[in-house]
Amino acid sequence: MDSEILRLKKLQAQSPNKAKVPYGNTQKPNNRAHYAKNVIIVTSGKGGVGKSTIAVNIASGLAQRGFKVGILDADVYGPSVPRMLQVEHERLHWNSLDQIVPSENFGLKIMSAALTTPSPDTPLIWRSSVATSAMIQLLDDVAWGDLDFLVVDMPPGTGDSQLTIAQELRISSAIVVTTPQKVATDDVRRAIRMLQEIKAPIGGLIENMSYFVSPESGVRHSIFGEGGGKYLSKEYGVSLLGEIPLDPGIREMSDDGLPVTVGGSDLQKSFFMGIVDRLLSSGQFSLDGGAVKEC
Ligand SMILES: Nc1ncnc2c1ncn2[C@@H]1O[C@H](COP(=O)(O)OP(=O)(O)OP(=O)(O)O)[C@@H](O)[C@H]1O
Ligand SMILES: [Mg+2]
């Protein structure tokens, strides 16, 4: 634990002035990600519903549509983005301006607190105040470059990380992930209420693991019940961006570090690209008529 804190102190020592910038509040958030035209957060009240899978595939789908995209893993205690994008063995390094260089794969700039540890399985044993400072550093001190989109993969719940992100970033769109069953939708309700409370714009709802189609019979099974996404969408007046089936192939690609939008079948890709295109045509984002040009 000491070595983790020393490492963090070393990181902080490199930007003493930035560390003094006061925290914002949710009504008037700081704009830490001033380099990104749009910030998308992928969140849910519930754990294990597919937030990271969806964040990675939305980011990769946006990159495939020609946008400059960064993905920040805000799940300090359960980071999964590095594995899902095959950079889990990369470690931190700095450029000549003493900025942290993000990892890159599949056309995405990638940063996670997990990349700051000596090895991929080192646990981050941090108090939440330390985790919050680390998150702010990953926003402030990383050489993200100009981005069209910064996609933030949030940890589950409605706690410290959610508040910090809402205080420190101007969120363009919060995407809420649910699964169909009541136990999940109860938690997701709390997340929606929190977003409403802190005035973060809710860009839409995604129902993941909606159904399973038997490969033998082609019969559709509602393993986790049905209708949760549609119900929440109606109840809170939030658009339902998509329903993604439970598909062992999606789990395998996540484990192998291959975004479905890159390695999936046309059908598998269509679930995520459909969501990306619905988001792009929703008018939520500042797009300047298209992607930022390479310079
Ligand atoms: N549609 C799907 N079909 C099959 N497996 C899926 C699907 N979506 C996600 N998974 C798998 O479910 C597991 C949990 O997904 P993921 O890690 O994306 O959830 P999460 O909400 O980010 O979890 P946590 O709350 O722990 O951060 C992973 O193994 C992932 O590969
Ligand atoms: Mg996750």
Image (tube, rainbow, N blue to C red):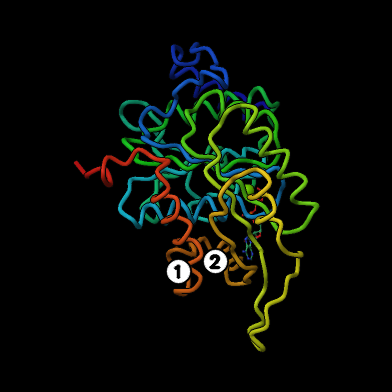
Quick check: is the Cβ at mark 2 less than 8 Å away from ligand 1?
yes
Q: Are marks 1 and 2 in contact (CB under 8 Å)?
A: yes
Say left or right for 281 vs 165.
left
The answer to whether residue 14 is above or below residue 76 is above
Label 2 belongs to which residue? 253
Q: Residue at x 46, y 67 (%)?
A: 270
Quick check: is the Cβ at mark 1 less than 8 Å away from ligand 1?
no
Q: Residue at x 67, y 52 (%)?
A: 178
Residue that lies at the very extreme toward the left in this rendered image: 295
Image x and y of residue 11, in percent: 49, 24
Q: Nearer the viewer, residue 93 or 60?
A: 60
The answer to whether residue 23 is above or below residue 276 is above
Say left or right for 211 vs 20.
right
Q: Nearer the viewer, residue 8 or 216?
A: 216
Instruction: Name the mark on residue 116.
Output: none
**CA gap, disc 1 to disc 2?**
7 Å
Say left or right for 16 vs 256.
left
Amino acid type assigned to the residue bearing label 2 in the image:
Met
Q: Quadrant of the C terminus?
A: top left
Q: Quadrant of the N terminus?
A: top right
Tag 1 secondary structure: helix
Amino acid type assigned to the residue bearing label 1 in the image:
Gly
Say left or right for 71 vs 135.
left
Residue that lies at the very extreme toward the right in this rendered image: 183
Image x and y of residue 22, in percent: 52, 12
Q: Residue at x 45, y 16 (%)?
A: 18
Image x and y of residue 8, in percent: 56, 25
Q: Residue at x 39, y 40 (%)?
A: 285
Tag 2 secondary structure: helix
Label 1 belongs to which residue? 263
